[in-house]
Structures are given as structure tokens and as C-alpha cells.
Image (cartoon, helix red, strand yellow):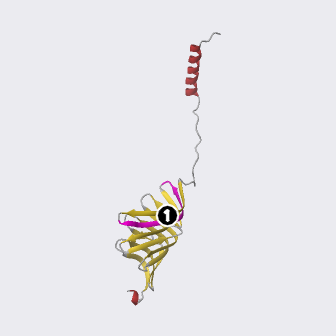
Amino acid sequence: MGLSIKHLLLLLFFTTLAAIFFLKPHKVGTIEKKGIPQIMFLDFKSYQISEEGVESIGRGLMAEKFGPVMKVKAPYFRRLTPHGVETIEAKEGVYTENRSLLFSRDVRLSREDGWRIATNRVFYDLKKGIYTTQGAPFVAHYGRSVVEGKNMVYYQKSGKIRADSIKANIVNEDI
């Protein structure tokens, strides 16, 4: 049986072609990455800086990015607004790539003039500069005056607030 190198290469070539047509292709196993963040930050601080200086500061205990969503534990944000310095903090927060934030669990929104709101849920649209409790109840304090209600909407640029079903205890000296 005198096989030459030429015959051996032809046999190898036809065997490879037969394998390509008749055998199933090998599949590589894929691993689902459920629950594993793409990026994680621990005890972080973030600054928004413009030509005028630092406009906002953000910090949290932990942030985990899952696709277009970043989950934040103990978020705290402080920013300069037309009405002074504004602060929001909560136990949990979710930031989405469409530039919105959802704060939940023990949310406190306050301004340096003494105005403060407590609720369990606040949605903030960064593009529009609007905070809303999305139907959740809230309690607002200004001095000794107290306002309770639900579905609060706070317009950051104008400083105006609107809400549904309010009950107010207004003290004369706070007017």
C-alpha cells in the first residue's frame, strides 16, 4: 500500500469535509450572569464639577451596575439649585441610563432654608428637574408647619410643590 503524501493530504481533506457536513458543530457552553454586577463600587463619592465649581456631591455605601441600571445602597446627594443647597438621602436608590433616579425606603429631601420632606419613595427626573412621590404619602415640614398628603410633585427650578389629598397645619410665623 503505497500512499504518497499527496494521497494522504487528499484523504485528510475529504475526511475534514465529511466531518463538516455530517457532524454537529461543537457548541460552547454559556454562563448566565444573573445577579453578578458588571461594575461595583464600595464606599464611593462622586462630584459634578462645572466652570463655577462643584455643583453636586453624591456618595453611597455600595453601587452595583446591572446593564442600564445602577443600584445604590444608602445614596446621599447634595446639589446646588436655584433655591440654595438641596439634599436627598435614602436607604436604597436606582439610577437608570435615561437619567432618572428612584429613591426608596426612608427618603428625606431637604433644602437649606429649613424645608424638608419625608416619604418612602421619590422619583427624580434629572433632565426635567422634577421630584415626585408617584402617589406615595409624604410629610413636609417648614419651621413648625406640617403638611401631609400624597402624590407630591416638586419642581426644582421654580421651587413650587403640588400634591393631592393634603392636610396642613400652618403656623402663622412660617408664612
Task: Give the residue displayed 49% in from the left and 58% down from the top.
Answer: 69
x then y, percent, for residue 109:
46, 74
Q: Is residue 66 one of those drawn in magenta?
A: yes
Q: Tell me the magenta residue range.
A: 52-67
x then y, percent, for residue 99:
42, 60
Task: Give the residue displayed 58% in from the left and 22% down from the top.
Answer: 15
Q: Residues within 10 Å of mark 1 (few under 14, many from 20)?
A: some
Quadrant occupied by the C terminus: bottom left
Horizontal placement of 30 versus 133: left or right? right
Q: Residue furthest right?
A: 1
Q: Amino acid at mark 1?
A: Lys
Main SS of residues in magenta: strand
Q: Residue furthest top?
A: 2
Q: Nearer the viewer, residue 2 or 137?
A: 2
Horizontal placement of 114 versus 39: left or right? left
Task: Give the residue displayed 57% in from the left and 18% down from the top.
Answer: 9
Rendered position, 4 above or below 128: above
Rendered position, 4 above or below 169: above
Q: Nearer the viewer, residue 159 or 42?
A: 42
Q: Nearer the viewer, residue 105 or 5?
A: 5
Task: Give the residue displayed 58% in from the left and 39% down from the top.
Answer: 28
Q: Nearer the viewer, residue 112 or 2?
A: 112
Report which residue position mark 1 lands on. Answer: 45
